[in-house]
Image (cartoon, rainbow, N blue to C red):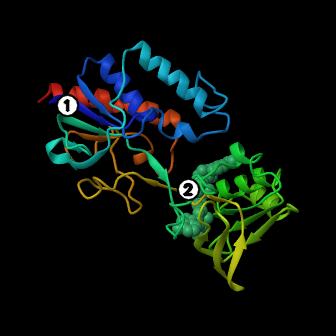
Amino acid sequence: MTDVIIIGAGMAGCSTALWCKRLDLPFTWLEQAPAIGGQLAHVYNPIPDYPGRPAADGAELRGHLQAQLAAEELSPSLCAAVVETDLAGHCVTLADGTVHRGRAVVLATGVERRRLGVPGEVELTGRGVGGSGRRDRDAYAGQAVAVVGGGDSACENALLLAETCRQVTLIHRRSTFRARPALLDAAMNHPRIRVLPDTRVKGLAGTERLEGLRLDGAAGEQVLPVTGLFVRIGYQPVTAMFHRQIRCDPDGYVQVDANQRTTLPGVYAVGDVCNPIYASLAVAAGQGMVAAKAALRELAAE
Ligand code: NAP
């Protein structure tokens, strides 16, 4: 039994933990990954806009965060995957069967990349599937690769990969794109990017490594030989273990009030899991502070 259970150790969970310590609020901190930082692990771009601490990439900012936690003698329980929650009872169960009970719960589970959900995608992840254009463009130099999606991320990755790849095929399920015009125009007019609108990926081919994609589009079914697949079809909130217990929007994002309170007493949400529009590191850090202070006030009033 503790005062606050914090689920997640991305920026929002780290901020919540730092503030709970500062406010002398006892807490149990759980993170399913083997390291803190959440999405920072996958940010290969510069982070110029985190106030007071611009960073060359996510790893650098994560290093600063890790050092700050170490100085405060704070560390979550790592590889501690919550598999079941009874949020009304402020109770969570880990994969190994351990049960934690608190007086309040802070949900900081973040978002994850959406997957295509087609045969071969999971099996070939790490073997041609799941890279980053910025990080991996040299590894795929001279090869034919594909990017799926119609937003800024898909266009940006296609452009990065086209710097080194022999051919980049940009596959989108519709004929209209969400990407902003500057990125879309640059992709459409790039000599090594081929755009396939109104096309869906039906499956992946390859056993040891990715060898091709089965496509279904305007020209019927075809197999596209590629050695790399970069899926950029947006993000989804990590709420599967509790979304029926609190109010979420139609996309699964947790709905909160100005104090980060969910629809259940003593249950708060912070960071990207409750930010479908204004997801950012700065917002996540601020919301961690709000939740810790709100929990302190409400627990003191009990
Ligand atoms: P996004 O804007 O949400 O676009 C996701 C794309 O994936 C959409 O075109 C969507 O198609 C498609 N999609 C969704 N589910 C799919 C499925 N199951 N199968 C096939 N296609 C699917 O996501 P994003 O590009 O990752 O961008 C996220 C946010 O980051 C945006 O606000 C974006 O502006 C920002 N961002 C900015 C930059 C930049 O400024 N340089 C770079 C990257 C990202 P439909 O259109 O048909 O729904």
Ligand 1 falls in quadrant: bottom right
Q: Residues within 10 Å of mark 1 (few under 14, many from 20)?
A: few
Q: Nearer the viewer, mark 1 or mark 2?
A: 2
Is residue 214 something one can see in this rendering? yes
Mark 1 or mark 2, which has the lower sequence index? 2
Find residue 99 and report its image quarter: top left
Badge 1 element: helix
Q: For the residue marked with disc 2, what is the amino acid?
A: Thr
Q: Quadrant of the N terminus?
A: top left
Residue 67, given in percent of the width and then of the height, sits at 49, 18
User: Would you place residue 4 above or below residue 203 in this image?
Assistant: above
Judged left or right of residue 49, residue 273 is: left
Q: Which is nearer the eye, 107 or 112?
A: 112
Identity of the residue drawn at 57% across and 61% down:
233
Quarter of the image where the C terminus is located? top left
219 sits to left or right of 50: right
Q: Is mark 2 within 8 Å of ligand 1?
A: no
Where in the figure is residue 9, as x and y percent of width and height? 40, 34
Asked whether 230 or 198 is in front, the reply is: 230
Residue under label 1? 298
Q: Amino acid at mark 1?
A: Glu
* Residue 230 appears left or right of 183: left
Q: Position of residue 260 (x, y in %)?
A: 33, 39
- Name of the residue lying farthest toward the front: 208
> How many circles with numbers are drawn on the protein?
2
Could you say which disc has been placed on residue 125 in the image? 2
Query: What label does residue 286 carry, if any?
Result: none
Q: Residue furthest bottom?
A: 220
Q: Residue furthest left?
A: 302
